[in-house]
Amino acid sequence: MPTVKVTSGVSVKIPVVIPRIDRIDENGEVTDIAAELVSRTALQWESEVVEEGDDNTEKIKRTGRVRIPSRCLREIIDEHQSFASRICKPPVSLQVSIGEEAKSEVSLKIGEPVQVKTHVSIQDWVPLDVVEKSKVTLEFCCAEKQPGNNSSTSGRMPYVWCGQLRRTVDLSNDDDDKSHCARIAFFQCG
């Protein structure tokens, strides 16, 4: 567990990054979002206090726990309906891969095409009646990283897509592989 040292009398804001919360726990029960968030954001603290006695000085360790009060968090969730959707896993997940291998960065030669693939899936906890009414539209698009590099002034398109750019996926159709792919070639850097 990471440790942060704070001197006494100082007000501190500690950023906490938590993974999104599953709506259904490992036992198949509906997750108590407030209780799960309280447990994930609780902070352990420890302090050393020097007490001077008659003969010598002694260090006393004190420990404690700081947490968000569950009642306050439940009020926030009730008052702000979008709060829970922001901290929970979304009902639909989308995987995107560029190129043949799973890399965080792809280097290409100008004019060389690369394949872009997507796959959409829906979480198990989404009710069937909602899945049957749901469709997802996958659309490929591209934007220049540095739009001010004069690529548009040359009159040439900086990139071109090959294949179908937009596809609507019916989430209730089990025969559909729920994926989409196209190729893109870049003709300028950026």
Image (tube, rainbow, N blue to C red):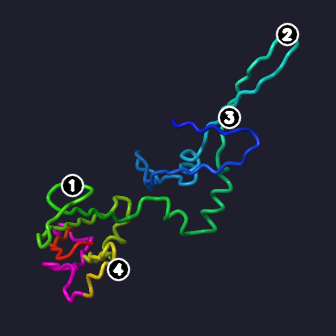
Q: CA distance from mark 1 to mark 3?
A: 44 Å
Tag in front: 3 or 2: 2
Please, what is the three-letter code of the amino acid marked with disc 1? Ala
Residue extending farthest to the left is: 112
Residue extending farthest to the right is: 54
Please, what is the three-letter code of the amino acid marked with disc 3? Gly
Which residue is rendered at x = 20% and y = 63% of the image?
98
Which residue is rendered at x = 40% and y = 50% of the image?
28
Q: CA distance from mark 4 to mark 1?
A: 30 Å
Which residue is rendered at x = 66% and y = 42% of the image?
66
Q: Which residue is mark 1?
A: 102
Q: Is residue 176 magenta?
A: yes
Magenta residues (range): 154-177
Q: CA distance from mark 4 to mark 3?
A: 53 Å
Tag in front: 4 or 1: 4
Image-quadrant location for residue 133: bottom left
Q: Is residue 78 magenta?
A: no
Say which mark, if any, is on residue 151. Answer: none
Q: Which residue is mark 4?
A: 148
Q: Which residue is mark 2?
A: 55
Q: Which residue is mark 3?
A: 64
Q: Earlier in the sequence, mark 4 or mark 3?
A: 3
Labelled pair 3, 2 in contact (Cβ < 8 Å): no
Q: CA distance from mark 1 to mark 2?
A: 66 Å
Secondary structure category for the residue under label 4: loop
